[in-house]
Amino acid sequence: MKAVTNPGDCRPLARRGGRQRGIALMLVLWVITLLTIIAVGMTATQRTEINLAANQVASSVFRAQADAAIQFAALNLLTQPPVATEAEALDTQVFWVPDGQPRVWGLGEQMLEIRIINEASLIDLNTADRDLLLALMLAVGLQDAEPDSLVDAILDWRDEDDLHLVNGAEDPDYEAAGLPYGAKDGPFDSLEELQQVMGFNKALYRILAPALTVSSGQATPEPSFAPPLVQAALQGISLDEMQGRLDTETAVLPETPTPQGRGGPLYRIQVSWHAPGGTFRAMESLVRIQQGISPPVEILWRRQVLVPEQALGSMTGEEEGQG
């Protein structure tokens, strides 16, 4: 006789098997999700590392190219133009002058922009007198009592005493303003330091920086090759008026200047490479160039920055050291 199988005895086993298969499916889905997260994280990390490595390589390549451009500019300044009469024009396409104008220079397939500035044609924050500093503030359009307070704050910052000028700022003023420092009572070590002086902000600093230096050691800048803002301060007029005069002179004067000295011995050399996206890589250096000494070219400092294009001419950054 055949045994009769009860169909009801199989249903619990089927339900248990279904639950086990569901749990296994959930585990598989969780494992797939976890592996996907890990893969996405690894991909993002690798992409970041690749971008960082590419940026480091591009930075190193640009530094080498910028160093080559600085040396080329120095060699150009060391090259003496042929003797010429006053009526003859100096070919500034061949013999560069430190007028701050951009010049395109090719290195292989890379096109770089080079600007040379005569450091002696800038206003030295450490040696300029009150009248010149005041003329500089007025040239950029500052009015009322603001120019006097800014100039006195500069003088109080750089002098060695703690005597308070009429419109100046000493330690108590900085403390009252909630600043964690006081007047330096010493010379400026860098242009960027001007932003710490009472009354100055980043916007005003960027306007003034292209006309300033802390390296020339001269009380009065050399007019030759001075930028328009310096010329305006020297002549006691506004920057707009000075620019109008320069535009008029450009319309009547020859395109190239008559033979003249090329400034020095200190030059600020700026090298930039325009990149997509409105930014560029740039290097700025202070170079001493003197014939008859060894070495004739000495790089006092250099700094490399990655900043918006509109900041050209007032580049700031960390100095990379001497030599």
Image (cartoon, rainbow, N blue to C red):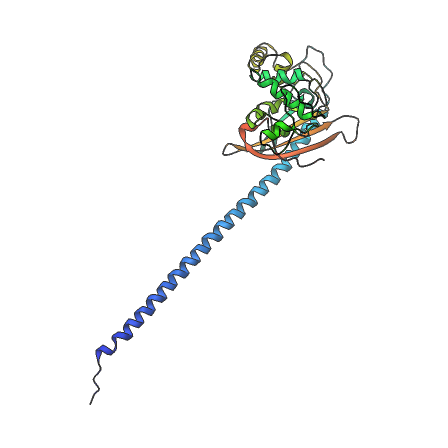
Farthest residue toward the bottom?
1
Quarter placement of the N terminus: bottom left
Quadrant of image for the C terminus: top right
Q: Looking at the rendering, which quadrant does residue 92 occupy?
A: top right
Count of numbered circles in the view: 0
- Residue ID at (55%, 45%): 52
Front one among 197 and 103: 197
**In the rendered image, is residue 115 in sight?**
yes
* In-front residue for pair 256/196: 196
Q: Is residue 51 left or right of residue 220?
A: left
Where residue 31 appears, as percent x and y from the top left, is 41, 61
Q: Residue at x 25, y 74 (%)?
A: 11
**Which quadrant holds residue 36?**
bottom left
- The residue located at (48%, 51%) in the rendering is 43
Residue 111, percent from left and from top: 58, 31
For residue 25, what is the image quadrant? bottom left
Q: Is residue 20 above or below residue 231?
A: below
Task: Provide residue 41's location: percent of width, then percent of height.
Answer: 47, 52
Residue placed most toward the observer, 65 or 289: 289
Q: Decide if residue 108 is in sight here.
A: no
Along the line of sight, which residue is nearer the eye, 66 or 33?
Answer: 33
Vertical order, 252 against 101 (above or below)? above
Question: How far from the left and from the top, in percent, is residue 37?
Answer: 44, 55
Residue at the (77%, 31%) spot, across then down:
295
